[in-house]
Amino acid sequence: MSSQDIAIRPYHPSDEAAIIQLWRDCGLTRPWNDPQKDIARKLTVQSDLFLVGEADGAIVGTLMGGYDGHRAWINYLAVSPAHQRRGHATALMRAVERKLLEMGCPKINLLIRSGNIAVKDFYETLGFQQDEVISLGKRLIPDL
């Protein structure tokens, strides 16, 4: 299977359970982030940048993008472990890049966990480089 075998489309509400399971399978969920709340929040802001990848009738990938008028952010890029290394993550990234360019977005930012070297290497193949920044965060609404 190649990246051409993945169909990329916007999120549909009937996708929720399969997507949450995919995120769990990929190790993306954390106790302090409720994935149902993350999906519900995303649907209120630029829901057209919440992309789903399908292959053989099953959801095999996701990507949440957002653009604030200054920079874009990528979250929840995930590909089912059984479908990795087939170009699906690259296809999802290219799809969101096209949408962001149409919006006039000059730059994409993303965060990866510091120990996830394989993901860092993947993003570097797509032209990303490490910025000289320190990432800070502040939770306004606890999900617990």
Image (spheres, rainbow, N blue to C red):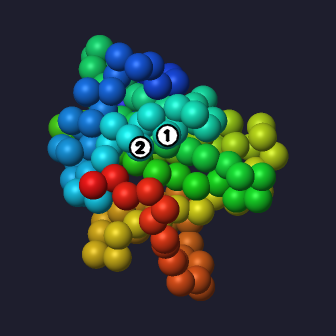
Q: Is any atom of residue 32 visible in this view? A: yes
Left or right of 132 in this view: 112: left
x then y, percent, for residue 72: 65, 54
Image disc number at residue 60? none
Q: Is any atom of residue 95 visible in this view? A: no
Are the residues tagged 1 and 2 within 8 Å (C-beta)?
A: yes
The disc labelled 2 sits on which kind of residue?
Answer: Asp
Work out whether 140 lies above or below 63. Answer: below
x then y, percent, for residue 125: 48, 61
**Which quadrant holds the C terminus?**
bottom left
Work out whether 1 lies above or below 71. Answer: above
Query: Which one is nearer the viewer's eye here, 83 or 16?
Result: 16
Total numbered labels: 2
State the residue position of label 2: 38
The disc labelled 1 sits on which kind of residue?
Answer: Arg
Tag 2 secondary structure:
helix
Query: Which one is nearer the viewer's eye here, 38 or 76?
Result: 38
State the residue position of label 1: 41
Instruction: Name the residue rendered at 26%, 27% in the picture.
Output: 18
Instruction: Name the residue rendered at 53%, 57% in the picture.
Output: 126
- The alpha-carbon separation of the residues under discs 1 and 2 comes to 5 Å
> Can you tell which quarter of the image residue 4 is in?
top left
Left or right of 103 in this view: 48: left
Tag 1 secondary structure:
helix
> Can you tell which quarter of the image residue 131 is in?
bottom right
